[in-house]
Image (cartoon, rainbow, N blue to C red):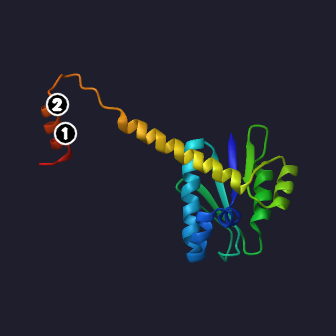
Amino acid sequence: MVILVVDGYNIIGAWEELRILKEKDIGQARDRLIEQMAEYQAYAGCRVIIVFDAYYVRGVESKSEKFNVEVIYTKEKETADECIERLVKELKNVKTQVYVATSDYDEQRTIFGSGALRKSARELLIEMDDVEREIEASVQAHKQIQPKSTIPLDKDILEVFEKWRRGVK
């Protein structure tokens, strides 16, 4: 099993689209990152956990799931880095490979010591762009496939049936 743990605010600060959203509304930037990671998770087939520290969201530690992505808000006095280090120690085993997405060099060194691998914010963005292109290509290819009818019909009759099917008069 492959698990990707994402340092939420680090990625938001590193990706231009999210950085611009953060200036307007931090909540929108968080939601957009969660949506993008949900697409990544669905396409890559790995488990994704996003960690946000309590700097922007005060309160007790909370966990939620949005778009099938686990989202963790740390305790008020806990940093995302501390939470990520704890998660890596809990999750890493012989059958599980853990990647941590962060551009924080100190955090990268620490997680290497725990047996996890790193993905920089730039590497993750490149992977996300690739995933989006592959999804778009797959959608376009699917649109071009014409359904085959087992009953031979004139083109005019097929157009009438198609209009009926779509509810067009």
Residue 19 falls in image quadrant: bottom right
Task: Classify 10 Å Cα crowding around label 1: few (below 14), some (14-19), many (20 and above).
Answer: few
Residue 25 pos. (x, y %): 56, 75
Look at the numbered discs 2 and 1 and tell me whether their residues touch, using CB distance below 8 Å: no
Q: Amino acid at mark 1?
A: Glu
In the picture of the structure, the residue carrying the numbered disc 1 is 162
Residue 114 pos. (x, y %): 85, 50
Residue 88 pos. (x, y %): 78, 52
In the picture of the structure, the residue carrying the numbered disc 2 is 155
Residue 65 visible within the image: no
Dot 1 lies on which element? helix
Instruction: Give the camera-side residue of 144 and 49.
Output: 144
Q: Amino acid at mark 2?
A: Lys
Residue shown at the point (65%, 75%) measured from the top left:
57
Instruction: Pick the quarter of the image with the N terminus.
Output: top right
Front label number (2 vs 1)? 2
In this rendering, the answer to whether 21 lies above or below 147 is below
For residue 142, which numbered disc appears in the image?
A: none
Residue shown at the point (63%, 47%) measured from the top left:
127
Dot 2 lies on which element? helix
Residue shown at the point (20%, 45%) measured from the top left:
166
Residue 89 visible within the image: yes
Residue 64 falls in image quadrant: bottom right
The reply, left or right, for residue 10 in relation to residue 146 is right
The reply, left or right, for residue 125 in relation to residue 24 is right
Residue shown at the point (80%, 64%) measured from the top left:
82
In this rendering, the answer to whether 29 lies above or below 138 is below
